[in-house]
Image (cartoon, rainbow, N blue to C red):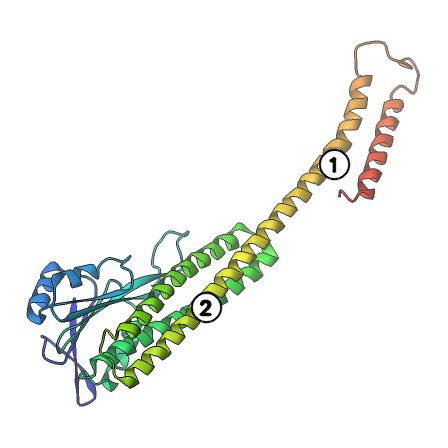
């Protein structure tokens, strides 16, 4: 599905067909004939549109026939029904710059383009470079917002894990960890993309636009540092809980072993006195009480010894 937007008198207007100075936004569901028609009408290589459908497309840029193609990764919520998948994943936003058009292709619905659409009436379509940088800005803002949400989730699940020691919280933390892995990978590639664009001046930026891009690089580096910090904290937390669980298991096994030893000694005494052979004092009127007293005495002594060694 293709939406065409035009800025008319500082108002965002959706139009039916492409014109000069428009922004075309492609969102699912996609149809091959739409790609072909759009490519022919705007002189865009069809490969640029098809490459946008690959969710694993890495952040990069290239130019062909004076058409600039940029891919940047942005975060989004994961709508998978698998309970072991990450809460958030990263998807590509593809930006295509023709002579007088801007085309964005989204494999999923994402917040960065929505934010850009809400501020499109403030943009000047003739300043296409700044519009691209503003899309970058919305992507960085999305990363920041999702990182804060991830950190809040992590804190909540850690508190619940301290109180319950259930497996569910560990699984939730693993899903948070998977989300951070996606974010770290995407932010690193986005940072390299922006640094390379600044170094090569791929968009032909003026001095003001270059300064804005430098600010975006700094913000992206900050988001990457935040993601790395949260990843390290979460990894340390999971390692600590793994050690705690292992230590608790060892304590439980130690207690069970101690109880088994205490119960096995009376069983040994009674089994000896239960043999079908002649045993001492078998005709004594106290023959029943003798093994009972011995069993109790042994159990008390062994229990005292284990308590002294703090095995319970």
Q: Quadrant location of the N terminus?
A: bottom left
- Assign a secondary structure to mark 1: helix
Q: Is residue 55 above or below residue 300?
A: below
**Circle 2 residue:** 225
Q: Nearer the viewer, residue 222 or 37?
A: 222
Please tell me which residue is depicted at 41% across the width and 71% down the height of the picture. 221
State left or right for residue 72 relative to residue 295: left
Q: Quadrant of residue 133?
A: bottom left
Q: Position of residue 225 (x, y in %)?
A: 46, 68
Horizontal side, residue 42 vs residue 87: left or right: left
Q: Is residue 65 visible?
A: yes
Q: Residue at x 19, y 61 (%)?
A: 29
Q: Is residue 181 shown left or right of residue 286?
A: left
Quadrant of the rendered image containing residue 158: bottom right
Percent from the top left, x then y, of residue 224?
42, 67
Disc on res. 258: 1
Where does residue 241 sit, x and y in percent of width and height?
58, 53
């Amino acid at each position: 599905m293709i939406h065409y937007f035009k800025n008319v008198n500082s108002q965002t207007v959706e139009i039916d067909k492409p014109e000069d100075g428009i922004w075309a936004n492609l969102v699912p569901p996609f149809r091959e004939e739409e790609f072909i028609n759009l490519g022919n009408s705007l002189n865009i290589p069809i490969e640029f549109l098809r490459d946008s459908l690959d969710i694993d497309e890495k952040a990069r840029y290239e130019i062909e026939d004076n058409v600039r193609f940029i891919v940047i990764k942005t975060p989004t919520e994961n709508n998978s029904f698998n309970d072991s998948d990450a809460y958030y994943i990263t998807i590509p936003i593809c930006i295509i710059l023709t002579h007088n058009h801007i085309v964005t292709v989204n494999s999923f619905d994402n917040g960065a383009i929505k934010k850009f659409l809400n501020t499109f009436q403030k943009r000047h379509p003739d300043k296409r470079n700044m519009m691209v940088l503003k899309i970058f800005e919305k992507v960085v803002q999305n990363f920041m917002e999702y990182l804060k949400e991830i950190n809040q989730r992590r804190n909540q699940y850690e508190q619940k894990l301290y109180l319950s020691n259930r497996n569910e919280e560990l699984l939730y933390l693993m899903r948070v960890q998977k989300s951070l892995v996606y974010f770290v990978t995407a932010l690193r590639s986005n940072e390299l993309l922006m640094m390379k664009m600044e170094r090569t001046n791929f968009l032909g930026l003026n001095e003001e636009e270059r300064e804005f891009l430098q600010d975006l690089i700094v913000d992206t580096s900050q988001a990457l540092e935040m993601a790395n910090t949260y990843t390290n904290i979460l990894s340390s937390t999971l390692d600590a809980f793994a050690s705690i669980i292992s230590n608790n298991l060892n304590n439980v096994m130690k207690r069970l072993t101690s109880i088994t030893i205490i119960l096995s000694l009376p069983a040994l005494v009674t089994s000896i006195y239960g043999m079908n052979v002649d045993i001492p004092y078998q005709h004594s009127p106290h023959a029943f009480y003798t093994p009972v007293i011995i069993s109790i005495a042994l159990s008390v002594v062994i229990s005292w010894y284990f308590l002294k060694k703090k095995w319970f």
